[in-house]
Amino acid sequence: MNSKRDGIFPDEVVLQILARLPIKSLYRSKVVCKLWCRLCSDKYFLQLFNEVSAKNPMLLVEISESLHLKSSLICVDNRLGVSEFSLDFLKDRVRIRASCNGLLCCSSIPDRGVYYVCNPMTREFKLLPRSRERPVTRFYPDGEAALVGLACNLSTQKFNVVLAGYHRNFGHRPDGTFICLVFDSESNKWRKCVSYQDEQFTHMNKNQVVFVKKGLHWLTGSGSGILVLDLDCDTWRKMPMPYEVSEETGNRVYLLELDGCLSVIQISDTWMNIWVLKNYEKEEWVLVDRVSLRCIKGLVPGIFPICQTGEVVFLATHKQVLVYHRKSRVWKEMYSVKNSCTLPLWFSAHAFRSTMFSCQ
């Protein structure tokens, strides 16, 4: 973009204002003038928009009111509040399996083995080609791969989908062979790698997958370490937790992202400690916040942190979505289920953000 003045404000000021608009409003503004019409394809503006949106995390929650009724989705936004959310443009009943940088990976409920990657803000989506490989181990209650990961690189405008699980012959227990299928958006093909793993994953451990430094990260079921898939070379490795976290027992541990860095949140009966991997190569963890949980004492046994920034932390309970403001140290209830709910909110809660990214 050039820096010539257009009317009252310089172009840069106009760009800063437009970068803070919801995507729907931004698309409507394209009819105002030629400059604004070019914005959605301008690399500088796309980068600016994505940087601004990263500071405003959102939460997507699937509400299952009955086993026989269709689930509904809501979006919890710290600035705009709660709104309904729809994936009806996929023309399929789907379950969200992973979220990364504004893209969602969804699996078809009626047609197992069918996956979509979509940008719900622009309503663009890609139906992934079926892999010729046999499905990896089905995992209760999802009936899908043990691990599903989505890696969305905003700078290259490319994404990867990872399906991983243990090989198991019919009627036998898994033999420890870990099969990993990786879809590459650039080649539009799947590739396969096989390794040996002895880790187990609970639903929350496998649901919270973090993409940083060209790798996908999962917390193991025991909470003793982090399993990392390097997408450049398709190799698995283990990363240690913060020393203080691994030494303490009885606390719950969660894996999140914080401003582009890997983060661990440790929750005890009275405290929430937030760690950040400041030096990824040297694996140096730093304690960046220590939050008292006394004012929400009754909710502590059922809270699960879902996403965070330097300003807020979103947490889900069985029937509530809470936000903690780190500077003012104030807790606020953002959403509460009024009716009976078949599953806890944290069971199907995903971090989300608004992104200008074409997945087609």
Image (cartoon, rainbow, N blue to C red):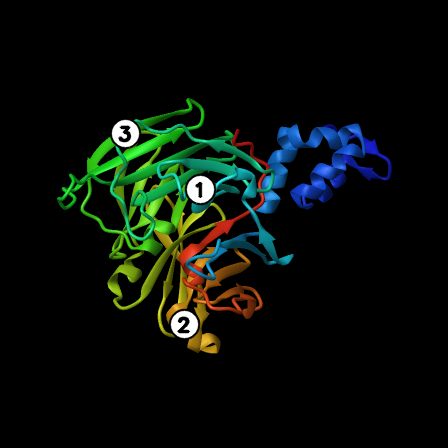
Give whichever of 42, 179 is nearer the camera: 179
Of circles 3 and 2, the one toward us is 3
First reached walking from the N terminus: tag 2 or tag 1: 1
Q: Which mark is residue 106?
A: 1
- Kind of element beneath mark 3: loop
Q: Please state if 281 lies on the left or on the right of 28 as rendered.
A: left
First reached walking from the N terminus: tag 3 or tag 2: 3
Residue 281 falls in which quadrant of the image? top left
**Whether residue 60 can be seen here:** no
**Image vertical order of residue 301 relative to residue 349, above or below:** below
Q: CA distance from mark 2 to mark 1?
A: 30 Å
**Image vertical order of residue 108 relative to residue 322, above or below:** above
**Image vertical order of residue 313 relative to residue 214, above or below:** below
Q: Which mark is residue 300?
A: 2
Q: Which mark is residue 133?
A: 3
- Kind of element beneath mark 2: helix
First reached walking from the N terminus: tag 3 or tag 1: 1
Residue 222, x across and y down, in percent = 24, 57
Residue 223, x across and y down, in percent = 27, 57
